[in-house]
Structures are given as C-alpha cells and as structure tokens.
C-alpha cells in the first residue's frame, strides 16, 4: 500500500436535530465512526484522522476524534442543554480514497442520521481539491 | 527562544501533548506561541487551542514540510520580531516529514534558538499497521527525533508498547524513549522533555 495519496476533505456542517438534547455527543461520535467504517468499505485505504469540533460559548466546545473504524470515537466536551442546532467543523483525512468519495460518504451518512431524526444538515465545503503524498521520504 | 517540534502520524496524540505542555507553560508565565499546521483548508486544533486562550499561529492550505516550508520560516521570523516568545511549539500535520522542517530551520534569520528539541509521538495502538502501510513516513518521524514519546500507554497492551519501543530503538538508538498516558502527572513528563519548565 506504499504511495497512498491523501486528499483531505474539510467541511462545515450546520446540523438541526430537534430531539438531540442530551444525545448530541453520542450521535456525532457515531457519525464520525460511521464515516470511518464506510470509508474502509469503499476499498483499500488507511484512516488517518477524522476529527470535528463545535464551539459554543467561551471555553465550551465539543471535540470528536476517530482514528480507526474498529475503535470508538474519542469525545471531549459537551453540547449545552436544549441545543437543537450546531455548527460542526469536520476534517476527514483518509489515505487512498478520492476526495469525491469521502465527500459522498460524509454527506450520505449525515443525511441518513438527520432524516431519521426529522432534522436536517447542510454542508459548506472548505477549500479546493488537494493531494498530498510523501512517496519519496 | 526555545523551540519544540512535535511530530507524529495523524491521530497519534500530538495535540493532547501540546495542550498539556502549553497549559503548564502558561501556568508558569512562560510566553508561549504554538505554530500549527493542519492538512486541509480548515483547522480543528487551532480552534480548540483558541478556545483554551492559547496563542496560536496557523499555517493552513498545505503541508508544512512541502509547500509551506517558506511560510514556516517567515512565521518564525515574524513571531520573533512581533511577539518575542520564550517558547515556540511547532505542531506539524501528522502527514508531515520532520526532516524537511529541520532542514528548513537553518534559513531562519531571527534571534538564535536557545534550544531545539524534536519530539516524535508514536501511537502504539496503530504503529504495527502504520509501519506496514506507510513505513517511510513513520520511520522518518522516529529517526528525526531526540525524544520518542509512546502515547496512549493507558489504552495499549504491553505487547503494543513493546513493539513501539522496538521500532524506536531500531530506527533511532540515540533517542530517549518515554511512555505517555493522560493520567501521567504533568511534572513527570516535563522533567524529561523540558526540565527548565518545572
């Protein structure tokens, strides 16, 4: 698997989930873990790091990190009570998959989760397509 | 100013370590700046560090060891002129090769560094897999360190930790190898990597 390219995918998502109070952490933790699992299902790839942050008032934030499809998300911080909307900045760094594939996986799972909960999610992609490779180190 | 370079693959625990060192530095009133490079156009770590009132300078939109090498040197010179920190911590992306960063540092024209330490963070949970699939990057990160820090020792098995030590010893016999876990008292780690801060 030498020479796997890294095409980073970054997005800011606006989530609306009317019934997520007290569950945001687990919902979004499972979301990032599903991204890792579905990326692996797409083919030969290595999960680099899938991480997200949502910031609230001063010093309050939710941070989620996934480094493998078979390990649970690491979750730090909490979402304030009675929250139905939040903005999530998400970085998906997976070696071996095209950015378009990662984008589709990321959107599809978000749509599935939000529709199951009568909510919605919109995506604002950040930056341009970029490839990264260190084949000659 | 003193300089620390924290390298290590994506998700190895670099940011947790940097946060711990910087938190301690701030408690000791050590004027500290963090220079963060994240692959991709948006930073997660810098948002977190800003939330924690840390002084963060970011290099976005590329890799610090490839397209942003000049940006790194310019930022270090700007930091020296405008902020004069006691301590600068560089946290490159986990995809970065520290060799290129260390090779670029001689082009820095600011006040001379009082010291330079290169710390490589090695994740024992994934090191075996990573050496198999992207050996050149992982080995280079180990080779160009004077301290190899084996992270997540509270989650890893003894065999995983032993393998991480083996990789470090085989590829960089002169490096100091330290085990790190979140429950380690801050002073224990700092005594090893930055005793002047304790």
Image (cartoon, coloured by chain):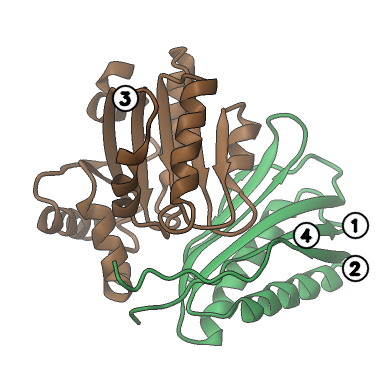
Chain colours: A green, B brown
Dot 2 falls on a residue whose secondary structure is loop
Instruction: Compute the Cα span from label 1 to label 4.
Output: 16 Å
Q: Is residue A82 left or right of residue A100?
A: right
Residue lying at the far top of the rendered structure: B29
Residue furthest to the bottom in view is A43
The residue where tag 3 is placed is B112
**Is A69 drawn above or below residue A85 in the view shown?**
below
Q: Is residue B16 visible?
A: no
Residue with the mark numbered 2: A118
Image spot of residue A61 (x, y percent): 68, 40
The residue pinned by badge 4 equals: A13
Q: Are marks 4 and 2 on the same chain?
A: yes
The chain to which mark 2 is attached is: A
Badge 1: chain ID: A
Question: Marks 1 and 4: same chain?
Answer: yes
Contact check, label 2 and label 3, Cβ < 8 Å: no
Secondary structure, mark 1, is loop
Q: Name the residue carrying label 1.
A: A18
Badge 3 element: loop
How crowded is the residue under tag 4: few (<14 C-alpha within 10 Å), some, or many (20+)? Answer: some
The mark that comes first in sequence, 1 or 4, is: 4
Name the residue at 27% across, 35% down.
Answer: B117
Cα distance in 3D space between marks 2 and 1:
7 Å
Which residue lies at the image location 77% right of the left edge and 48% below the top edge? A22
Q: Residues within 10 Å of mark 2 (few under 14, many from 20)?
A: few
Position of B102 with respect to A50 (left or right) is left
In front of the other: label 3 or label 1?
A: 3
């Amino acid at each position: 698997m030498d020479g796997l390219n890294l095409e980073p995918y970054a997005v800011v998502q606006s989530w609306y989930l009317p019934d997520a109070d007290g569950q945001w952490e687990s919902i979004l933790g499972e979301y990032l873990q599903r991204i890792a699992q579905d990326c692996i299902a797409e083919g030969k790839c290595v999960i680099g790091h899938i991480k997200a942050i949502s910031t609230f008032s001063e010093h309050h934030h939710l941070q989620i990190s996934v480094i493998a499809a078979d390990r649970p998300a690491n979750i730090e911080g909490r979402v304030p009570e009675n929250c139905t909307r939040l903005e999530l900045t998400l970085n998906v760094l997976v070696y071996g998959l095209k950015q378009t594939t990662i984008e589709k996986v990321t959107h599809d799972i978000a749509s599935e989760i939000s529709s199951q909960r009568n909510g919605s999610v919109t995506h604002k992609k950040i930056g341009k397509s970029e490839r990264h490779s260190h084949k000659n180190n | 100013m003193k300089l620390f370079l924290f390298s290590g693959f994506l998700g190895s625990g670099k940011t947790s370590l940097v946060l711990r060192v910087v938190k301690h530095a701030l408690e000791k009133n050590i004027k500290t700046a963090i220079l963060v490079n994240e692959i991709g156009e948006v930073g997660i770590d810098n948002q977190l560090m800003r939330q924690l009132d840390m002084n963060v300078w970011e290099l976005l939109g590329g890799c610090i060891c490839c397209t942003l090498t000049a940006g790194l040197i310019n930022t270090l010179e700007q930091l020296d002129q405008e902020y004069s920190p006691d301590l600068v911590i560089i946290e490159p992306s986990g995809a970065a090769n520290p060799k290129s960063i260390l090779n670029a540092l001689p082009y820095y024209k600011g006040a001379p560094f009082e010291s330079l330490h290169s710390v490589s963070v090695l994740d024992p949970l994934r090191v075996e897999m990573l050496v198999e699939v992207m050996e050149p990057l992982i080995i280079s990160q180990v080779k160009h360190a004077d301290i190899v820090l084996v992270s997540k020792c509270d989650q890893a098995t003894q065999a995983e930790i032993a393998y991480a030590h083996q990789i470090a010893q085989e590829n960089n016999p002169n490096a100091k190898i330290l085990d790190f876990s979140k429950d380690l008292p801050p002073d224990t780690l700092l005594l090893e990597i930055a005793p002047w801060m304790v």
